[in-house]
Image (cartoon, grey):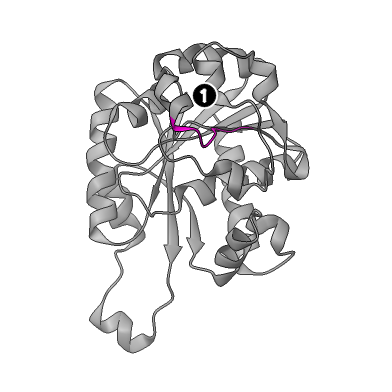
Amino acid sequence: MGKVLAFASGKGGSGKSVVTANLGIAFAKFGKSTLLMDADLSMPNLGILTGLKSAPVTLYEVLDKTKPLDQAIYKVYAGADIMPCGTSLEAFLKADIRRLKNVVEKVKERYEYVLIDTASGLNKYTLGGLKVADEVVWVVNLDEPSLADTHRLKTAAELFGLKTKGMIVNRVTSLSWIERKKIPAPKRNELETRLGAKILGVIPESREVYKATLLQKPVLEYVSKGKIMKAFRECARNLLLENMNQ
């Protein structure tokens, strides 16, 4: 039985989908059978970020029971699989998020890891994606709106008994010494105390991510070395080790 990890953020623009996509590719590169699932039903991007060119059948059709599950799974980079959502507004309106649990129960019998990209914010689609996971990984930026919104979403998730795996601090920008004096970054222990979650990885802001997104590729397939690749690999390794130690 596989492990189901949901990736969530209280605020849009955190880079949650980029993190989910690249960690899924990293898991596959580490030899783990991995399924990426796009449960951001209203604004799905996981297919684009993993270079999926065509998806005639998606999670939408599985959720409205018009197509079987197997037809909505596709191969992407490094041997990882993906179950994307589509672009049809009509299909989105027909999809029933309440059926997601049944879909996840079926796919986690086939994979070691299922990584779910959830919607941002506090709404039924986000909570629907979180409720089907074994644990949640929170993706945050260092700005106050991101931290405050994610803390609020985490508090709501805990009302449903959802467990936190940890958090990933994403899009961290390097500041000069003078800038650091004017804008002091929160310390690691302060962040962990505030969100009540262990930091599993820190991903730097990178032009390579931007360029890879323009090319509709995961950044781990666009670069072969450098800080961004090292950061994603280290984050994936930490997640895998956390799971092994449980």
Q: Which residue is rendered at x = 42% and y = 33% of the image?
A: 136
Q: Which residue is rendered at x = 27% and y = 83% of the image?
A: 181
Please tell me which residue lies in front, 160 or 59.
Answer: 59
Q: Secondary structure at mark 1?
A: helix
What is the span of residues highlighted in magenta in the rendered image?
83-89
Instruction: Specify whether 47 is left or right of 99.
Output: right
Please tell me which residue lies in front, 152 or 59.
Answer: 59
| Magenta stretch prevailing secondary structure | loop
Q: Which residue is rendered at x = 50% and y = 60% of the image?
A: 203
Q: Is residue 1 visible?
A: no
Please tell me which residue lies in front, 178 or 77.
Answer: 77
* Residue 238 x/y as whole percent: 57, 46
In the displayed structure, 166 sits above or below 3; it is: below
Q: Which residue is mark 1?
A: 60
* Residue 100 x/y as whole percent: 47, 18
In the displayed structure, 150 sits above or below 135; it is: below
How many dots with numbers?
Answer: 1
* Residue 50 x/y as whole percent: 64, 46
In the displayed structure, 201 sits above or below 98; it is: below
Q: Is residue 213 visible?
A: yes
Q: Which residue is rendered at x = 56% and y = 42% of the image?
A: 46
111 is within the stretch colored magenta: no
Name the amino acid, label 1.
Answer: Tyr
Q: Image quadrant of residue 99?
A: top left
